[in-house]
Amino acid sequence: MSLLFISQIFMSITLLFMVIGKTPLYITAIVGTTISVIIAMFESKNILINTLLLSGLNPVILDMTGILMFIGVMQSSGFMDDIIKIIIKIGRRIGGGEGVAFASAVGSGVIGMLTGFTQPSVTAVVTAKPSVLLGMNPNHSAAIHGHAGHLGNFGGFTHPTQVAIIGATNIGFGLINIFGIFIAVCLILCSAIRSKIYRKKYSIMIDKDKINIAIKEIENQKNKYNVYIVFLPFVVLFCGFILGYPIFLLGVFSSILTIFLGQVNIFNAEKDMINGVSKIAIPLVATITFLFMSAAIKEIGLAKSIADVFEPILNIAPVQAMFIVAVFAGFITQSYGASSAILLPFLQATMEVCNYNFALAFVAAGGASIAQYFLTGGPVAALSTVIPLVEGSNLKDSNKFQRPSQIFALCLILILSFIIKF
């Protein structure tokens, strides 16, 4: 038995422990990967642990820093609060109760995109009651609010697994975020439309007094800045994504634009920008850990072994195979973070036979980030935190309402997987 094979066994055991979730995720990954690499080094002089560790210092870390500097000044200046209020008001005017819930999910999802931690209750505490007063079924309201995590994870910049996938495929932020936002918004919109159809089907009557109370609660929230001013930094940021400019510099420039538009003290704003970067701690550790592990999986030959086992399907439909594995990983672990133990080795294996790196990253991130919510509404900071805020709702029925929309989003990803060829 070769030492490389023993190394692969140790790595497989490490991945199994990570999936089971009974040991600390990052410590398990670092220790298990290190042992596997040391064993492999006795057989191959080409494997160097220092080189593999340095591979964890991916340029994606630079991108995260720029984004977090931006979110730091957006929050401290009050721009972010105003954006959420505006989104909710627009949602109410366009779509009634469903519009409020949709806007709330988008608002907390945007916060999650930028901070790496999506907490639907941040906006639901304000919008849950009005959405029900405007005629929504409580379970439907809770379900739509709970969809925020899809946007925060799949459209975001700092979730550890999202960062690891982007780093491993070396595609960079930008286009994948736009695709992720599109899929997540379609998912939330699907639930809102289904709720509207339900109300029309069963002719649910709404008390006019309750409607007036709900409208008053929402419209009485005053904004600090003009609507055009608060959205301009975001417009600049996303236009820069599309044009392919360096994301770190875009984050810094958008921060400076926010300081100028908000007439914020530049010295205090700089402190807020640096404080924003403090949120990088978890994604930084996760990025270095997962990319170290990912590089080791490739170097010790485990990726090739997996590719050899799945060779028939990988030769026929590698991107679709990656999608199926991603959905399975999210479904069984119910955690985007824990699913990395399944995603990363199979991603490396698929990259051995397929050079459509963007397509692979897209289906890997999308499949797992959506499927994690299917069984129970997601991990700790998801549907379960919204239920107490929506009177009359329960976890079982709210989660049941979410599932058709999640299947719809997964079908969209699957269809796009046949179209994307890069």
Image (cartoon, helix red, strand yellow):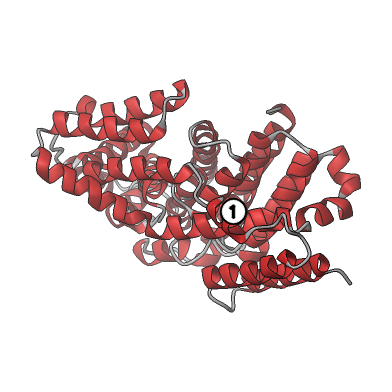
- The residue that appears at 36% across and 39% down in the rendered structure is 96
Residue at the front extreme? 45
* Residue sitting nearer the eye, 396 or 65: 65
Q: Tell me residue 42's x, y (percent).
A: 74, 68
Please determine whether, in this image, residue 387 is positioned above or below residue 170: below
* Residue sitting nearer the eye, 228 or 47: 47
**Is there any visible trace of residue 373 in the rendered image?**
no
- The residue that appears at 17% across and 48% down in the rendered structure is 271
Q: Which residue is mark 1?
A: 51
Q: Which quadrant does the C terminus fall into? A: top right
Q: Which quadrant does the N terminus fall into? A: bottom right
Q: Tell me residue 77's x, y (percent).
A: 16, 42
Is 324 left, or right, of 184 in this rendering? right
Please determine whether, in this image, residue 342 is positioned above or below residue 248: below
Q: Amino acid at mark 1?
A: Thr
- The residue that appears at 24% across and 35% down in the rendered structure is 255
Please determine whether, in this image, residue 25 is positioned above or below residue 263: below
Residue at the right extreme? 312
Q: Tell me residue 305's x, y (percent).
A: 83, 56
- The residue that appears at 57% across and 51% down in the rendered structure is 369
**Is there any visible trace of residue 297 in the rendered image?**
yes
Is 400 left, or right, of 251 in this rendering? right
Is 18 left, or right, of 356 in this rendering? left
Label 1 secondary element: helix
